Image (cartoon, grey):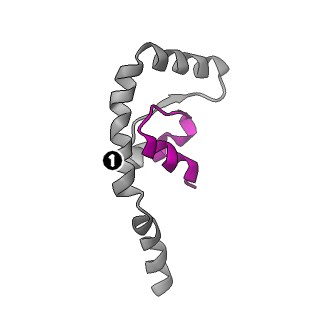
Amino acid sequence: GFPMKLSEYFYLGLPIIASKSYKHIFDEFGFYGLFYDPSRYLSFIDVIQKCFESYDHHLRLSKNNSQISIIKLDWKQVVKPLLMTNEK
């Protein structure tokens, strides 16, 4: 499923750190994010450090998330496939 909280994070255009289990969502919609391996707690620390050390770089790459979310996660776009399914 798609956690709706992610859409809010994308809209903000800030760097997002997420479990690698969500990477497929980022890839599907073309969002930028940093990923950690939830089975390794040091992986999470490493990703936070990476983001902190190059924050401006990650912020710049994340700014597109806001525009992408406006286009691809628009409520009409999200509901459209559901409505088409019900019409059949």
Q: Nearer the viewer, residue 43 or 68?
A: 68
Q: Which residue is denoted by mark 1 in the rendering?
A: 67
Above or below — where is 31 with respect to 80?
Answer: above
Above or below — where is 51 with respect to 73?
Answer: above
Q: Tell me how many marks there are.
A: 1
Name the quadrant of the N terminus: bottom right
Residue for point 47% across, 78% down: 83
Above or below — where is 3 with respect to 40?
Answer: below
Over which residues does the magenta segment extend?
A: 1-25
Tell me residue 59's x, y (percent). 38, 28
Above or below — where is 33 with respect to 47?
Answer: below
**Could you say whether the residue bearing mark 1 is in a helix, strand or loop?**
helix
Would residue 85 be visible to someone looking at this image? yes
Among all residues in the image, which is located at the extreme bottom?
88
Quadrant of res 64: top left
Residue for point 46% across, 86% down: 87
Tell me residue 36's x, y (percent). 55, 27
Would residue 88 be visible to someone looking at this image? no
